[in-house]
Image (spheres, grey):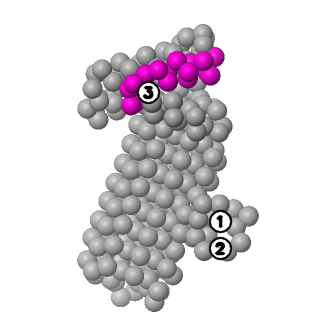
Amino acid sequence: MIHQTAIIDKSAVIDDNVEIGPYSVIGPETFIKSGTKIHGQSVIEYAEVGRDCEIFNFSSIGKRPQDLKYKGEKTKVIVGDGTTVRECVTLNRGTAAAGQTIVGKNCLIMACAHIAHDCIIGDSVIVGYSTGIAGHVEIDDSAILSSGIGVHQFCKIGESVIIGAGSMVNMDIIPYVTAQGDRVVIAGLNLIGLKRKKTKLSEIENIKDAYRILFMSKLMLEDAVVKLKESSSQYVKEIVSFIGRSQRGIARPKHG
């Protein structure tokens, strides 16, 4: 059902079984798939919104990026199936650098959060209330960012990471850990998240060993990574791969 007060651009493509609430604006080059519900007074343009999403009131999806280098190039936002976007969220479209901003499937983006241009957000990610994610950030599957977090541009956050409320993320965070603080430090492993994912106990032990080698041994990071490359564990391989992709350097525990 499309409310009679909604404004729909003639270039928009809207599947059957989409609900659009009062005073919402669906702008140019927008594609909305079946089963999605858009609450009143939302604005969506230059976006692809997947199946069975729910977009709450006053959200802004696909507006121009907040980047002075943007010169009007044609870019977009992609929102995966089953994702929920709560009130007053802003998801900016990409720039020429990547062309698109991506939010994966089954994510929860809580009220007043901001995801900037050219970000890549994986599946089943939770972004807490009033958290701001700067441009070009990559967040892997099943990460949880609590409320009031700031993430510096170009940072990478690994799979199944949990970041505590009010943290300032200025370095990359390896998979499977918890992190917190102003300038964020690693606080330990996300054992609860790993157990919820039914990770084998043997693999949890492999991750613990990798953590000890990286952060509790006296090895230099480069030497620790060389040692971890000997592991056959897929989880450890993911940690090694993540470190190899890091551009800003990885966050570490606070010692002493």
The quadrant in which the C terminus is found is: top right
Q: Position of residue 166 (x, y in %)?
A: 55, 38
Residue 222 magenta: yes
Mark 1 neighbour class, 10 Å CA radius: few under 14, some 14 to 19, many 20 or more: some
Q: What's the residue at 40%, 86% (across, down)? A: 5
Q: Residue furthest right?
A: 68
Q: Amino acid at mark 3?
A: Val
Left or right relative to 61: residue 74? right
Query: Which residue is under mark 2?
Result: 73
Q: Amino acid at mark 2?
A: Glu
Query: Which residue is under mark 3?
Result: 236
Contact between marks 1 and 2 (CB within 8 A): the answer is yes
Above or below, comparing residue 182 to residue 156 in the picture = above
Regarding residue 165, the answer to whether it shows in the image is no
Q: Which residues lie in the magenta part?
A: 220-235
- Provide the secondary structure element on which disc 2 rests: loop
Above or below, comparing residue 231 to residue 245 in the picture = above
Mark 3 neighbour class, 10 Å CA radius: few under 14, some 14 to 19, many 20 or more: many
Query: Which residue is under mark 1?
Result: 96
Along the line of sight, the residue nearer the viewer: 112 or 74:
74
Q: Nearer the viewer, mark 3 or mark 1?
A: 3
Q: Amino acid at mark 1?
A: Ala
